[in-house]
Image: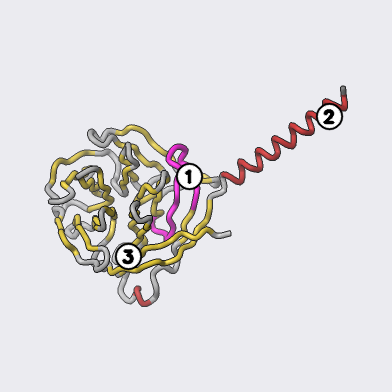
Amino acid sequence: MNQLLKLFFAALAAVLISSCSDSKTSETPVVYTYKVINAYPHDREAFTQGLAFEKGLLYESTGLNGSSTLRKVELETGNILQLHKLPAEFFGEGITIYKDRIIQLTYRSNVGFVSNKDSFELLKKFDYSTEGWGITYDGKHLIMSDGTLTLYLLDTETFREAGRINVHDKDGPVSRLNELEYIKGQIFANVWPTNRIVRIAPRTGKVTGWIDLNGLLSLQDRDRPVDALNGITYDAVNNRLFVTGKFWPKLFEIKLVPLK
């Protein structure tokens, strides 16, 4: 009997050790580098705060008081097809597309705008109590960042808070979350003011990946002042990931390459 008990406990210990090892491995975020697939012209006067993509067109929000805009852009040429200038008191921030609307945040005014996607006609405004940084749509809720470690789930019609996600990795909280994009069940977020994007599991807030985009902008592209990497959008139809930055002369289509 004693021998059977020893064998049982030895087997149990092996299972527990294996389980702990698998858990630890599953909690280790994947680190990615990138491959540039295409580079497109980008307005280097644009202080990019938000990007969205639909049916071959880019939608972009730019910031700075007195220079903030909502614009529709031709991807291949960078030509601005349509532009709406925000009143000077507003500092434009993230945008997302929801049905036939564009939802745009502002930085410290505690107000967001809902506009018709085609005409840019203002349909309504909504309030929020935090700063506005990035916003995306996961198919059910709007997800908003405010520069902290917290992401806010908002009702798509009332804009009332429906939940929160606190983002963390194995080393602790991950803050300064900025522009957001929901891609294949994960939240991608620029981490201001770095050249890194973090990938987040929405249900738990756990970081599942880090994307290192250092070196994306060449020295030649920096012949005039540029600011932080900011702007993520995804073409779900053609599986294309686009990124850019504030005052960047290019917008890049990239492929993620996991580091081994």
Residue 233 is situated, as x and y percent measured from the top left of the image, at: 33, 55
Specify few, some or many for label 2: CA neighbours under 10 Å numbering under 14, 14-19, or 20 or more.
Answer: few
Q: Are marks 3 and 2 in contact (CB under 8 Å)?
A: no
Residue 206 is situated, as x and y percent measured from the top left of the image, at: 49, 43
- Residue lying at the far front in this picture: please name it: 237
Which corner quadrant holds the C terminus? bottom right
Q: Which residues are magenta?
A: 192-209
* 31 over 130 or under it: above or below: below
Amino acid bearing label 3: Leu
- Residue under label 3: 251
- Left or right: where does residue 110 sit relative to residue 22? left
Q: Secondary structure at mark 1?
A: strand
- Residue lying at the far top in this picture: please name it: 1
* Residue in view at x 29 percent, y 66 percent: 247
Q: Is residue 194 magenta?
A: yes
Nearest the viewer among 240 and 237 is 237
Q: Secondary structure at mark 2?
A: helix
- Residue under label 2: 6
* 257 over 29 or under it: above or below: below
* 121 over 67 or under it: above or below: above
Between the C-alphas of marks 2 and 1, the distance is 42 Å
Nearest the viewer among 257 and 31 is 257
The mark nearer the N terminus, 3 or 2, is: 2
Amino acid bearing label 1: Pro
Q: Is residue 214 magenta?
A: no
> Looking at the rendering, which quadrant does residue 78 occupy?
bottom left
* Residue in view at x 79 percent, y 28 percent: 8
The mark nearer the N terminus, 2 or 1, is: 2
Amino acid bearing label 2: Lys
Specify few, some or many for label 3: CA neighbours under 10 Å numbering under 14, 14-19, or 20 or more.
Answer: many
In the picture, the disc for residue 229 is: none
- Residue under label 1: 173
